[in-house]
Image (cartoon, helix red, strand yellow):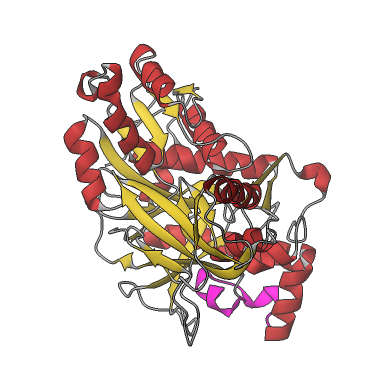
Amino acid sequence: MVQNWNDKNGNFNTASAMDFLPREQLKFIQSQRLSAMVQHAYNNVSLYRNRMDAKGVKPSDIKSIDDVSKLPFTEKSDLRDTYPYGLFAVPSSEVVRLHASSGTTGKPIVVGYTEDDMEVWKTSVMRCLLMSGINRGDFVQVCYGYGLFTGGLGAHGGAENLGCTVIPASTGNTERQLMIMRDFGTTAICCTPSYFIHLIEEAPKYGIDMKSLPLRHGVFGAEPWSEQMRNYVQKNTNVVANDIYGLSEITGPGVGCECSEQNGLHILEDNYYPEIVDPDTGEVLPDGEEGELVLTTLAKRAMPILRYRTHDITSIITMPCKCGRTLRRIRRIGRRSDDMFIIRGVNVFPSQIEVALMRVEECTPNYRIILERQKELDTATVEVEVGEEHYTDSVSELDALRKKIRTSIMNIVGIKIEVKIVEPNKIPRSQGKAKRVIDNRKI
């Protein structure tokens, strides 16, 4: 059933109505938007023009959404190699917002938005919040980080567009977050699932009963989380916990979200077209088969992205959703085809850690990253060997070196990661590809 929601002028929200379009009508919109977006990208982005020419594909060949598979893939490395503005398709005078996510070599991945792009983004997040049961009149506490990362301002814009009262709490300061939740009458929260579980665990220390709060809705994203984590949240609070999906390279949060059925994430296909491909061959797989999610932006002018390989492993659910939405759903994402991991909502690559370690002269190239889950919070510890001449029994000297390494990692990754200095030759060696990440979590 279409949600009965009106905009600020009392008009039916047509953006939300897009969620319920007949598939043929949706396909017509997708085809029109893809054709226009490919022409725009070809005319204004040399990387796409060169790759399409190399494949013998012209914009005129893209007449339907079914032709999307003719286009070249885009990889995260393309955004890094064209840093900062090489994939922009409009003059800088039309770019009204810049965001960035962490890059693999210390330089961020930069994304831009026109004024129209911002409206598409805000409307996309708004539709996701509606799916989750949030509506006008809700008090939405946004606990994603504000700044270059897209989470905070992305969730903020969508909630504001919906007509909610937005509380821009940002991240950290648990006691203050809980106080705001209680005193401001927060009814919905947007944050990482691991941080909300942390709030649940800390609340009793400050005399706060989570079930006594008016909090009813939680939209959690920026990191993988399990059904067990959802059950924990819903058992210990009155919150309905829903998953939201997005990535900076595409737009930020708002690419897809769970509805009240909590059975897969609806992808906003009119703005972001999903494919599932074989991670090894790139071959497009039919709906229902597991593979790598590939996304194409259909309504982003500043920085159109064609067939972006997310490396997120999932599948498209073939059964219609009981909520009535015709947008296809993907299964929630629990793993990736590459070695990236997410800590406190921040994407981290082993190559970033390596760059940081190699900036410290005492370190050797022998290291590994241990991922663990402690009280539903993901943690990462970097174990690194130092040269024999630098390894010492002096606690103070080792502490000073550890601090030096932590600072180097912080400067590149942007978050604090624990460091453990180990004796020379302590880390196991491999005859093949070094296993850098030891994942002891159970996601």
Left or right: residue 166 compared with residue 1: right
Q: Closer to the camera, 290 or 9? A: 290
Quarter of the image with the C terminus in it = bottom left
Residue at (59, 72) in percent of width and height: 63
Instruction: Tell me residue 195's x, y (percent).
Output: 38, 38
Q: Is residue 57 magenta?
A: yes
Left or right: residue 219 compared with residue 306: left
Q: Closer to the camera, 207 or 51? A: 207
The boundaries of the magenta stretch are 56-72
Q: Is residue 96 magenta?
A: no
Q: Say whether residue 3 is visible.
A: no
Image: 339 above or below 54: above
Q: Say whether residue 15 is visible.
A: yes
Instruction: Tell me residue 292's x, y (percent).
Output: 43, 71
Instruction: Tell me residue 116's x, y (percent).
Output: 65, 42
Residue at (49, 86) in percent of width and height: 432
Q: Closer to the camera, 221 or 72? A: 221
Instruction: Tell me residue 4's x, y (percent).
Output: 33, 31
Quarter of the image with the N terminus in it = top left
Residue at (74, 71) in percent of width and height: 47
